[in-house]
Every structure is written in structure tokens, then in C-alpha cells.
Amino acid sequence: MAALLPVGARFWTAAAVVVVALWSSGAPALVYPVYEQDWGLTPAVITGIFAVYPVVLVVVLVIFGGISDYIGRRLTMLAGLGSIALGVLIFAIAPDAAWLFIGRIFQGIGVGLALSPAGAALVEYSRSVSRASSVNTLATAVGLTIATVLGGALVQYAPWPRELTFWVLLAVTVALAAAVYFLPRNDRSAAPGARWRPRPIRVPRALRGVVTAASLGAATSFAVGAVLISLGAQLIKDVLHTDNALVAGVVLAISAMVGGVVSIAARRLAPRTAVASGAITGAFAIALLVVSANLSSLLLFIVTSVIFGASYGMLFLGSLGLINRYAQPDHRAGTLSVVYLVAYLGQGTVAIGLGLLATALGLAPALSIVCPVLIGLALAAAAAAIFFGRPRREAPSADALSAASSIGR
């Protein structure tokens, strides 16, 4: 039998899976203009390619959300990384737009399979729930930052702007899969003898309020992120009059980078406090976003990105913290899947809706319609965290379960 990774390396390997999943999700963003120029793609085709990803990911989460609780974290992460690698390879060799749809389908399958078990593994390999939540949030920020900054640099200054970013990501994904292979094999959390079958994800009754608060918090962060990316690309083009992909990537990475810093600084906040604070901050950032769009002010957009980054860091940290603290091991991955499911539904709905409205009415009028809805979502997340951010009957926390297990040994 192959030697297993040391405990510390297992934790960071699981974090790297989150990084690669988010890197994969954002990798095509800065290559889309190259496809548009080289292949003459219309905005409708680009929007369709974008929309395929969250749709597929949501389907995977609905059907396979809790599968790692039954077959193990390691095997599920390997399956996810394999699908991500296949999707990235298809992007690297794609001769036309039809291949991009296929590649995006495999990326959606891979990320849908990999994210929840990686998040659950972070808790199981960690000494603390707060550390696992903080590192998970940081890993999402790092993945998005790599996708935009490294992707922008490769597109702008390296050869093969359509392909190289995907070859680099493919190499990293394969190397990471090799590390995941050496994680523990017996890492399922369902009861002995329990078998997986396709069925709706079940959330224990006592945790439904907690999961609602966590899901609304994550959905707010993902939905506003989708708007920022859409608006950011347009502002960079209109205000700076530049098509420089690296400049675009750095500007788009601001909120992710700030979110990563805040996730470390705020790791000792109670999860419900983090969600409520992040949601209220996010509502302010959304209002500021409308002003920056109407003024076409890049400086104001950057300020908005910084404020939203702080909001994102607290929202996602608190959302993960709620699940990691209260969900018991035998349904932790499935419960995390519910949070990701709602988050990606929100992201996909907002991105597609904003795109359709912007095409029909223009960007500023579209934001005037979408942003009040997002402010309502943010305030709902804050209210849910305040009123429902604890289980009905106090469930044993992951830290308490770990301590009890240690005493038993």
C-alpha cells in the first residue's frame, strides 16, 4: 500500500483542491475576448458558454451532493479533478465554440464533485473549525485571483493566448490529483453498511435555519461577485480604453484578494456575526456599485470592489463556519452541497438576468433593476443569520465531537 501524506499535508492538499476548482471556474473569463475576436462569437454565444457551467454544477450538486459521505472524500475529489482536467484539456485543444460548451460541462461536473468533499476534508484534517472555514474562504480567493491575474498575464504577454492558460492549469490539476491519491482511503463518514443512491440532499430539521442563513450568505457573495465581474470588464474597457488582459485581471482580482485577507483577519468572529456583518457591508457595496456604473468611475468601482471584498470574506467565512460548526460528519458534505447549490443558483440567475437586461436596456438601467434585488437578498441573509443562525436544539460542534473522540481513545 502506498504511503499516506502527513496530516498537515493532507489539510493543505484539500485546500489546494478548492483553489484548483475556483481557478478552473474562472480560467476562461479572460480568454473569452480572444475567442470573440478570433472566431467572431456573439455575446449570446459567450453568455451561453458561461451559463452552461452553473447549470451543470447545480445538477451535479442535486444528484451527487452527498456522495463523498458514502464513497469517501478522496475518491470523490479524484473524480472531480479528473473531470476538471478533461474539461481544461478540451479548452486547450478546442478548434471551435462547440468544444467550449463541452469543456464547460466537464468543468461544471468536476467542480460540483470536488468542492464539497474538499470543504468537508478541511474540517476533518484540521485542529479547528474556524481554521478550516478561514482557509476554505482564503482558498476560493486564491483560486479566483490566480484565474484572473495569472490568466490575464498569460493571455496578454505569453504565446498561444487561447491555449497556454489551460495547459498550465491542466499540469497543476494532474499534479494535485497525484497528491490526492495519497490521502487516506477509508475516509467515508456515513454509517457502516450505508450505501449511496441518487436522492435529494437531506438537511436535518434542527439545522434548517442554520443552512438557510449559510445559503443566503453564500448566495449573496456569489451573486454580487457575478455582477462585479460583468461590470468590471465593461468599466475597464470604457474608462481606461484598454483591452489589456492583465490590467483587467488585476482589477477583477481586487475583491478576491481583499476577501482572502479578511477571511484570515476575521477568523475568530462568530459565524452568525460574520454573515450578518458581511451581508450589511455587501448591501452598502451594491448601492455604491450602481453609483460607480452611472458615473463610469473606475476609481469608485475599485473602492466598491474593496468594500465588497471585505463583505465576501465575512459572508463566505461565516457561511462555511455555520455548517462546519453544527453539521455532523455523516452529512457534512451533503449539507455543504446545499450551500454551494444555492450560491451557484444565485450566481447563474443574476449573471444571465443581468446579461439579458443589459442587452435590452443598457448596463446602467439593468443594474438599477438588479441591484435592489441584491440588496434585498443581502438584508435577508443578515436577518437569517441573526434569527436562525443557531440550530433548534444545540447540535454537538465538530470541535466537541473531535475532543470527545480523542478522550475516547
Image: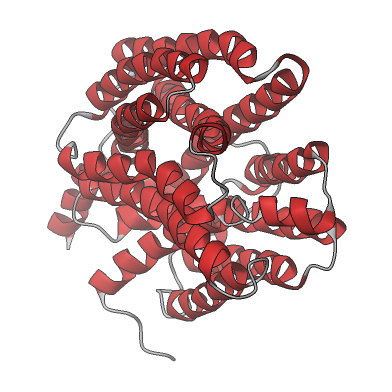
User: Which quadrant would the C terminus be assigned to in this image?
Assistant: bottom left
User: Which quadrant would the N terminus be assigned to in this image?
Assistant: bottom left
In the depicted structure, whether residue 225 falls above or below residue 363: below
Q: Splitting the image into 4 quarters, where does residue 159 fall?
A: bottom right
Task: Residue at 84% x, 51% y: name it.
Answer: 40
In the depicted structure, whether residue 91 falls above or below residue 168: above
Residue 186 visible here? yes
- Residue extending furthest bottom? 1
Q: Is residue 16 left or right of residue 271?
A: right
Q: How many marks?
A: 0
Task: Residue at 36% x, 42% y: name it.
Answer: 254
Q: Is residue 310 left or right of residue 201?
A: left
Q: Splitting the image into 4 quarters, where does residue 8 fall?
A: bottom left
Q: Position of residue 179 (x, y in %)?
A: 43, 78
Q: Is residue 230 left or right of residue 352?
A: left
Work out whether residue 380 or residue 7 is closer to the camera in this orientation and state it: 380
Residue 392 visible here? no
The image's colour scheme reads: secondary structure
Q: Position of residue 266 (x, y in %)?
A: 18, 36
In the depicted structure, whether residue 299 falls above or below residue 131: above
Q: Position of residue 191 (x, y in %)?
A: 48, 53
Work out whether residue 399 or residue 277 is closer to the camera in this orientation and state it: 277
Q: Splitting the image into 4 quarters, where does residue 57 fall?
A: top right
Task: Residue at 34% x, 56% y: name it.
Answer: 122
Q: Position of residue 330 (x, y in %)?
A: 44, 47
- Residue extending furthest front? 241
In the depicted structure, whether residue 365 falls above or below residue 101: above
